[in-house]
Image (cartoon, rainbow, N blue to C red):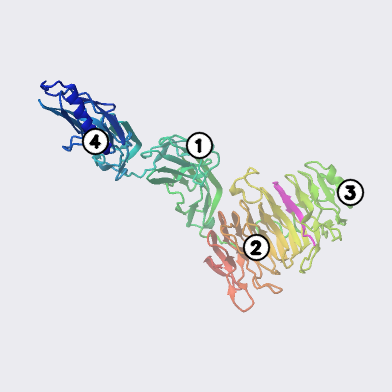
Amino acid sequence: MEFNIESRSLILLIGILLVSMILPTGVSALPPTAQFSANTTQGQPPLTVKFTGTSISTGLSSFLWDINNDGVIDCTTAYPNYTPVYTYKTAGNYSVKLTVTNASGSDSEVKTNYIQVTSPATLPIAQFSANTTQGQPPLTVKFTGTSISTGLSSFLWDINNDGVIDCTTAYPNYTPVYTYNTAGNYSVKLTVKNAYGSDSEVKTNYIQVTSPVTLPIAQFTANTTQGQPPLTVKFTGTSVSTGPSSFLWDINNDGIIDCTTAYPNYTPVYTYKTAGNYSVKLTVKNAYGSDSEVKTNYIQVALPVTAQFIANATYGKAPLSVQFTDQSVSPGLTSYQWDMNNDGIIDCTTAYPNYTPKYTYKTAGNYTVKLTVTNAFGTDSESKTNYITVTSPTTAETFGAEPNPTGDPLGGGPGYDRIITETDTSVKYVVSTKDQLLDALESAKSGEVIFVKENANIDLSGTYSTPIPGGVTLASNRGSGSSSGGRIFQNRLINDPTTSYSILDVREDNVKITGLRIEGPDSTTSDRGSVGPKTGVTLFNKKGFEIDNCEISGFSIGIGVIIGNDSLKSLGLGSEKIGRDVAYIHHNDIHHCQSDNLGYGVMIDGGSALIEANLFDYTRHAITGTGRSGEGYEAAYNIHRGNTTHNIFDVHPYPYTTPPTPGAIAGDTYKIHHNTFYSSQPTEDHVESYNVIIRAVPVHGVWIDHNRMQWNGEYGGTLHPPVVQSDGIGRVFMTQNLIGPDQVFYLEGPVDVR
């Protein structure tokens, strides 16, 4: 309370005088009644309050004010209705007491908590934290309140925000503890209330209670796993994964995701259009990790089964033991039925794909062998007619070409009994010049014969790859009397192509060339330089071709006869048709086809042929194959006189690279029997001249038997076997040959390997 202290005495004196003047002499004073009021009773500090006394008291009186009821008189006055003024500087509830005294007594009025001085109004701020917010059940969490609230307050905790108050306290920073027993995301709400209002804080999904960590397990099945293309397969996922997951399907395991889904048991459908074995991979990912299942070669898409087989020997005396090798193409579970002599009785059955049954033929005869293969995709059989030839134990075996069962002289010429002469009724055209020949070739029809006069010298220089129509025979009379046959030749011209070309080109089926001299321009062994290789006769992708009783020479930088790019299957022929159905090359004299890099008598370039009863000399390779798939030849009753610059019979690898390509093949099927090799000593500066060289592993095999062969004599004095296999080992069967100058019999081998 604040008063003007200097005026207190004056006020007291004036009051006493006034009382004495008013009261009559001799009148007694009544007991007083203390009363007061205030102009305000509530507010914030500093709060100034004006009190007004309304007491009743007669006579001389004293008025004692205890403004905050602390027992200390804050002001005293004789004026009954004095209006003291007091300033409250501190918040609080204050009681006020007025005591009035006169001659008759005294009276007091106390107003408890009459003056309420409050701090400025402050709304509460709800705040809290937790010692952990994630974990597996049971998860115990301790919450800590950090709220701000003035005055009396209440704190209401809804631990999982379900609208139910889990605990209540008046302590602002209370730390409730709660245990979550079930997995889930829980929101937490704290509400704080005081005299001025309330506030809430909600933390959504604040507590995350997860199931125990579970890695996914990738699993799937398919409604079918085998079939022919196009094969449509429906996959079914049976994976196990908790929580949000992704499912990645690599249908053919090529590293490319074919479909992705969040649905665990999705059933993708995929169509396999190409034959092959396909692995399938499913990868499953979730918050805890990933898992993959790979089923290797799970989907097997195959063309119909193909039965194939070979034998290690096809000729011999009884009893003849033969080992067969299955080479069938058949995926999946398969049964194999062997009828060794095609009598309709199954001699052995097996489910093993590469089974090698042995069978002994006890009686002389020609035996047909049949293999039947069955799997889920179908059945196929391969029959090889008269495949096994068994001779009587008393029958003398023959070796080399000299026995010559053909009935005509080796190499043709005099004594050949199938010579066409100019007067034959089959002759349609007789020619002796280039123009006559070209006109006849343009006009001739199938079944007609064009005869080249025996004294003709037809120069086709500058004319390249002259075609012979289908079914036409181009003939002369080599061997008739003293005739050497009509001559068709070429010289080199300055504008000749630098790429390969031929003199005669066979572009249709059933063409025959007989009794001619076909002569190229190169008879030396010099390098070819930049000139293009010439070929005498070329056949590509046709069948029924025959060339016989011809003299072919002068192709040192080229090839006498080339049989190229035939596919037996495309020609409607099976693998057992290696031989004359495509090309029959027989009773020819082929010589002077040798240079440093080229010079082949006959080259099989993906085709097939029967090469029989020919004479070879002065060659680099008398017969060569390029090793393409499906390629093969049968070489029988041929003589090589011994002049060579390299290996005599040769099969290259395909592809032909330096260094060799891994997985290269040496063609398909080759049969080399009853040939005579008079030398394996190379001329020039070459270091090797094997009778036969196989430069990789063939698909089916090479059979070498009943030949007269020579050791390979290399400079340096080392002798090697007549046959060598390089860049791979296997499927070369060498049996029953005479070898060396003394012609020693070898039942098996020897085969050099490098």
Query: Mark 2: which amino acid?
Result: Phe
Q: Which residues are magenta?
A: 531-547
Pointer 4 with pointer 2, Cβ within 8 A:
no
Q: Which residue, given by chain and number where applicable, does mark 3 sit on?
A: 436
Q: CA distance from mark 3 to mark 2?
A: 38 Å
Expressed as whole percent of the image width and height from the top left, the position of residue 589 reads 74, 61
Query: Mark 4: which amino acid?
Result: Arg
Q: Nearer the viewer, mark 1 or mark 2?
A: 1
Q: Give the quadrant of the N terminus.
A: top left
Determine the secondary structure under disc 2: strand
Label 2 packing within 10 angstroms: few (<14), some (14-19), many (20+): many
Residue drawn at (63%, 66%), measured in percent from left and top?
A: 691
Which comes before the other along the chain, label 4 or label 2?
4
Q: Is residue 82 above or below residue 321?
A: above
Determine the secondary structure under disc 1: strand
Q: Work out whether residue 638 or residue 623 is closer to the camera in this orientation and state it.
A: 623
Q: Which residue, given by chain and number where applicable, does mark 1 sit on?
A: 270
Q: Which mark is residue 457?
A: none
Query: Mark 1: which amino acid?
Result: Tyr
Residue drawn at (22%, 36%), measured in percent from left and top?
A: 9
Q: Evaluate whether residue 342 shows in this view.
A: no
Which comes before the other along the chain, label 1 or label 3?
1
Q: CA distance from mark 1 to mark 2?
A: 50 Å
Q: Work out whether residue 121 or residue 465 is closer to the camera in this orientation and state it.
A: 121
